[in-house]
Image (tube, rainbow, N blue to C red):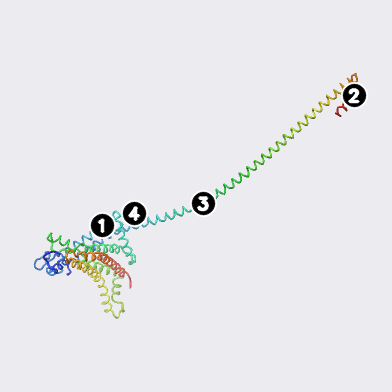
């Protein structure tokens, strides 16, 4: 083994290779690596954020669901209450109407009876007079015996 | 194992680089034997080491820059995924060991890791394939694992060494660096002793870096060559387990070279 000029050749070629590596190899590759690292970090951040947002969204969906359920329950309750109220009111109205109709009918009937009574009374008076005339064979001055006839009619 | 060679000739052939240099007798020419290589001395160059290492380095730059150009920030696929894995691995190591700001350290660590790994990886190519192919094309010697050439590992280690000195002076100034070398561990009255100790420690850094890688790869290559001396039907019994084990070694050595480079440069920035 002997040393010769190869050593100088190696020093020169080593220097050239280091220079070329510094110039054309190291910068583009490390830049690409750094950029990818950044992209991955950003991607992971975004994924984290998305997961957090999803959890938030689920939370709010849950809350909204609870709220709407409660609202629905309230509405149903109110509706039920209102329905029974309406039924009650209808019942009352119907009752009142029925009462009114009954009262009116009763009054009508009363009136009819009275007027019938009056008519009968009048006819009875006439009949009494006519009968008395037949019995007595003479006419009766209605005016003179009016008091008597009316008394008779009233007693009927 | 090529026919017509003794075992020692075969081993020596596989451990000789294709060297072009100034031979005292033949002038500028390719060495035809180990002796001629030795005769050429410093004024020669290992053509196979240079071609393979520069080729592998160029492959590294080509592959990585191609992926870098087309890199998307979306889901990475195939090669991009693999290369990003390497980049992140190196970047993590640099960030955990080197806390100062520097635009050079991380790309250099990547270059060292991948380049040394690719050079080591050539060790897993069966030892006879490419040398035999080269022999058929009339090339005598062809060592395809550049990191089994001490010149290659020393070249990288000394580049790191220059950077250690450069960053030491940049961070601490010439005075500070000299003080660090001479005023510790024993205080200014033992200055020569301190200087000796610290200089040995400083020189040991590149030497140990280079020799560790070279030694591991050279020994591994040597074992592959020895296995290749066995009869062909018995080779797989040893070469397969050793190759599997060697996958660990080549990766580990590339990693160690990178980590120690980062640590040495971090130490150069620190004040003691």
Chain for numbered disc 3: A
Q: Position of residue B269 (x, y in %)?
A: 31, 69
Using residue A36 as the reference point, say whether residue A92 is left or right of it: right
Q: Position of residue A34 (x, y in %)?
A: 35, 58
Q: Nearer the viewer, mark 4 or mark 3?
A: 3
Q: Nearer the viewer, mark 1 or mark 2?
A: 2
In three-dimensional space, the C-alpha distance between marks 1 and 2, rounded to whole angstroms, equals 155 Å
| B215 or A155, nearer to the observer | A155
Quarter of the image holding residue A26?
bottom left
- Whether discs 2 and 4 lie on one chain: the answer is no
Q: Which residue is mark 3?
A: A62
Q: Is residue A143 above or below residue B198?
A: above
Q: Which residue is mark 1?
A: B63
Of helix, strand and loop, which one carries label 4? Answer: loop
Q: Which residue is mark 2?
A: A145
Badge 2 density bin: few <14, some 14–19, many ≥20, Cα 10 Å: few
- Whether discs 4 and 3 lie on one chain: the answer is no
């Amino acid at each position: 083994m002997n040393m010769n000029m190869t050593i100088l050749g190696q020093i020169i070629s080593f220097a050239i290779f280091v220079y070329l590596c510094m110039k054309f190899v190291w910068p583009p590759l490390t830049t690409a690596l750094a950029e990818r690292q950044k992209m991955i970090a950003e991607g992971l951040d975004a994924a984290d954020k998305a997961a957090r947002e999803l959890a938030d969204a689920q939370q709010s969906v849950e809350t909204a669901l609870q709220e709407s359920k409660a609202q629905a329950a309230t509405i149903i309750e109110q509706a039920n209450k209102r329905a029974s109220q309406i039924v009650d009111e209808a019942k009352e109205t119907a009752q009142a109407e029925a009462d009114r109709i009954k009262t009116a009918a009763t009054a009508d009937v009363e009136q009819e009876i009275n007027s019938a009574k009056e008519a009968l009374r009048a006819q009875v008076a006439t009949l009494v007079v006519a009968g008395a005339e037949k019995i007595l064979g003479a006419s009766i001055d209605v005016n003179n015996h009016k008091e008597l006839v009316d008394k008779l009619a009233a007693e009927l | 194992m090529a026919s017509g060679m003794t075992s020692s000739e075969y081993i020596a052939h596989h451990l000789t680089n294709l060297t072009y240099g100034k031979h005292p007798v033949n002038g500028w020419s390719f060495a035809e034997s180990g002796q001629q290589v030795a005769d050429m001395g410093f004024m020669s160059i290992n053509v196979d080491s240079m071609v393979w290492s520069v080729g592998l380095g160029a492959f590294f730059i080509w592959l990585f820059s191609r992926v870098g150009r087309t890199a998307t920030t979306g889901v990475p696929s195939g090669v991009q995924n693999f290369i990003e894995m390497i980049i992140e691995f190196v970047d993590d190591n640099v960030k955990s060991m080197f806390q100062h700001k520097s635009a050079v350290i991380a790309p250099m660590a990547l270059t060292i890791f991948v380049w040394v790994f690719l050079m080591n990886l050539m060790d897993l190519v069966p030892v006879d394939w490419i040398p035999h192919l080269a022999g058929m094309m009339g090339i005598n010697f062809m060592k395809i694992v550049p990191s089994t050439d001490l010149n290659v590992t020393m070249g990288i280690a000394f580049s790191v060494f220059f950077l250690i000195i450069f960053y030491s002076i940049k961070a601490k100034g010439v005075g500070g660096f000299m003080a660090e070398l001479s005023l510790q561990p024993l205080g200014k009255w033992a200055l020569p002793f301190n200087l000796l100790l610290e200089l040995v420690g400083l020189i040991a850094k590149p030497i140990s870096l280079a020799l560790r890688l070279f030694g591991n790869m050279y020994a591994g290559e040597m074992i592959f060559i020895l296995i290749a001396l066995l009869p062909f039907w018995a080779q797989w019994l040893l070469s397969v387990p050793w190759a599997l084990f060697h996958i660990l070694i080549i990766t580990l050595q590339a990693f160690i070279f990178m980590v120690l480079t980062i640590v040495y440069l971090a130490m150069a920035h620190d004040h003691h």
